[in-house]
Amino acid sequence: MATFRIAVIVGSLREGSFNRKMAGALAKLAPPDVEMHQPTIATLPLFNQDDEKDPSDAVKRMKEEIRASQGVIIVTPEYNRSIPGVLKNALDHGSRPHGQSAWKGKPVGIIGVSPGAMGTALAQQHLRNIVAALGMPALAQPEAFIHATEAMFPAPGELDESTRKFVQTWLDAYLTFARRLAG
């Protein structure tokens, strides 16, 4: 059975973030033929177009990991009703220089966890605009705006039962979508 590689981009740098926990849970829910890996975005320099001709090793590494994947899942918090700067920085690096985007054509699933009542709805809307401009087909339905509680993560990589069922349904829909487009 061939391995289906998914790059999971976590839009939070904090080790104990809800979104990092969700990324770990997604990896545990994935079927055996799916390999999920998290390209490092924490070490990327701030995007500067002057550096495009000689990108840093961190940028090269991230772009290689994206290119080696059949799909991308972005797990993002919502900061000030939008996406975190570190996530935007990674998207910008991966898309440049013009004509050499690592993102183009990669099927993307967007999910996010936040203690706010609306989950990450506004961040995801902004992110959908960005990925459309990057040429990334995005899973439209189901959407996954998850209101976080400490109880939803009973152990590392684990979700409470109702959250697990919902996230499994979302992940199954994303993988069906991504396999269809990647095939």
Image (cartoon, helix red, strand yellow):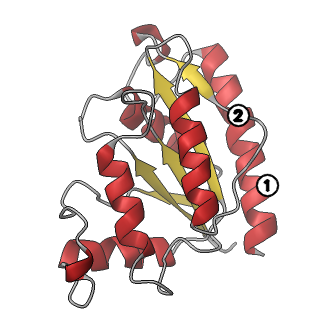
The amino acid beneath tag 2 is Glu
Q: Disc count in the image?
A: 2
The answer to whether residue 82 is above or below residue 153 is below
Q: Residue at x 60, y 26 (%)?
A: 145
In the depicted structure, whether residue 122 falls above or below residue 171: above
**Could you say which is closer to the camera, residue 62 or residue 172?**
62
User: In this rendering, would 17 be left or right of 140?
Assistant: left
Residue 38: percent from the left, percent from the top? Answer: 39, 56
Residue 135 in percent (x, y) is at 64, 69
Other-residue count near label 2 (Cα within 10 Å), few / some / many at <14 / 14–19 / ≥20? some
Is any atom of residue 33 visible in this view?
no
Residue that carries the numbered disc 1 in the rendered image: 176
* Quadrant in the picture for residue 45: bottom left
Name the residue tied to disc 2. 143
Q: From the viewer's perspective, is residue 57 above or below residue 178?
A: below
Q: Residue at x 40, y 78 (%)?
A: 96
Tell me the mark number nearer the camera, choosing from 2 and 1: 2
Q: Secondary structure at mark 2?
A: loop
Kind of residue indicated by mark 1 = Thr
**Rendering coords of residue 52 (x, y %):** 27, 83
Q: Secondary structure at mark 1?
A: helix
Mark sitting earlier along the chain (2/1): 2
Q: For the point 77% across and 69% down, which residue is it?
A: 181
Give the position of the N terminus as an image quadrant. bottom right
